[in-house]
Image (cartoon, rainbow, N blue to C red):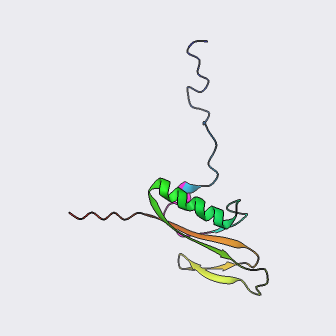
Amino acid sequence: MTNYYPNKDRTVRLGRPPAYPWKEWTDGTERLLVEGKDFRCMAESFALLARRTARVRGLHVTVSTIAVPKSAKTPLEVKVNDEPQNLQPGNTYVLLKFEREETDDES
């Protein structure tokens, strides 16, 4: 079995597929993600994951978690990218925005 390599043409991707579309989410647009729909863990854990992703990619991230209690009578309105969004009672949301880190080059 010399020169045997089952994936030498790279038609089969190695490793685990990405769990979240970080390439899309790190484009600099402010995003509102819903717990249980856009990500599968608790909002606080996802915020930590977003911070780690930012650090690994050399970015800065602003993360906020918002939990709207079930007892709320009306949806909570917030602005995301200057557009109003209604946050429904009983849901938890993560608002995040990735940005390039500023470098202080003083010459």
Q: Quadrant of residue 58?
A: bottom left
Percent x, y for residue 39?
A: 68, 60
Residue 54 left/right relative to 18: left
Count of marks overlaid on the render: 0
Percent x, y for residue 56?
A: 49, 53
Q: Nearer the viewer, residue 29 or 100?
A: 100
Q: Quadrant of residue 41?
A: bottom right
**Residue at image coords 59%, 17%:** 4
Q: Nearer the viewer, residue 9 or 38?
A: 38
Q: Residue furthest left?
A: 107
Q: Quadrant of residue 64?
A: bottom right
Percent x, y for residue 69?
A: 75, 80
**Residue at image coords 65%, 62%:** 45
Q: Quadrant of the C terminus?
A: bottom left
Percent x, y for residue 5?
A: 58, 21
Q: Residue furthest right?
A: 71
**Residue at image coords 56%, 25%:** 8
- Provide the residue span drawn in magenta: 23-32
Say if 107 sits above or below 91 in the image: above
Q: Residue furthest top?
A: 1
Residue 87 left/right relative to 96: right
Q: Quadrant of the N terminus?
A: top right
Say if 89 sits above or below 45 in the image: below
**Residue at image coords 51%, 60%:** 26
Magenta stretch contains residue 38: no
